[in-house]
Image (spheres, rainbow, N blue to C red):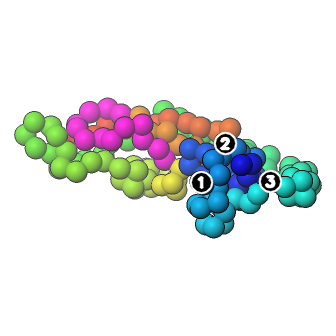
Amino acid sequence: MKLILKENVAELGYKDDVVEVKDGYGRNYLIPQGKAIIASNAALKQLAEDQRQRAHKLAKIKEEAENAAKALEGLKLVIGAKTSSTGTIFGSVNVLQIAEALSKAGHEVERKLIFLKEPVKEVGSYKATIKFHKDVVTEIDFDVVSE
């Protein structure tokens, strides 16, 4: 089933992307939630016209995303967590804590843009991926230390 995404969907695509998904996923989740519409000929023509009109706006958005990514270059965060004597964290460090640490460092990043490759459950050094735009992705380093 071909769909046009109306908003960014993690692990699937970005707004205005035409994606191919299984029928059940499209009919039972994406369309009822308002996240996508069926990619009919009329909808595809409308999408092409909308993209043509928004081309300069998209260029500005991409430029802002690149500037935000450049501002984070070389940034290393330190996140404190309560740990046991062996260095295991009680719970885990999640994207909310990374977003808060970025905010304290003076960089406002929405938490839904931050992704971790694996759960952070021990003290150490890790990387988080921040997807500002579909073409602008950056990684930041962060250390988890015991409080």
Instruction: Give x and y (percent) for residue 58.
Output: 79, 50
Q: Which residue is mark 2?
A: 134
The residue lying furthest to the left in this view is: 85
Is mark 3 in CB contact (under 8 Å) with mark 2? no
Distance Cα–Cα, label 3 vs label 2? 21 Å
Specify the quadrant of the image occupied by residue 127.
top left
Q: Are marks 3 and 1 in contact (CB under 8 Å)?
A: no
How many labels were placed on the picture? 3
Determine the CA span between mark 3 and mark 1.
15 Å
Residue behind mark 1 = 25
Q: Give amino acid for label 3.
A: Ala
Q: Position of residue 51 (x, y in %)?
A: 86, 52
Identify the secondary structure beneath mark 1.
helix
Q: Nearer the viewer, mark 1 or mark 2?
A: 1
**48 or 111, which is in the foreground?**
48
Please state which of residues 135 and 39 is positioned toward the viewer in this rendering: 39
126 is higher (above) or lower (below) than 49: above
Mark found first going from the N terminus, 3 or 1 = 1
In magenta, the rendered stretch is: 114-126
Taking the view exactly as shown, the residue that stands out farthest to the front is 23
Residue 76 seen by the camera: no
The residue under label 3 is 39
Given the image, on which type of amino acid does mark 1 rest?
A: Tyr
The answer to whether any part of residue 87 appears in the image is: yes
- x and y percent of residue 72 in the render? 52, 40
In the image, 48: left or right of 21?
right
The crowding category of the residue bearing disc 1, from other C-alpha atoms within 10 Å (few below 14, some 14 to 19, many at least 20), is few
- Residue found at x 56% / y 44%: 11
Residue that appears at 75% across and 53% down: 4
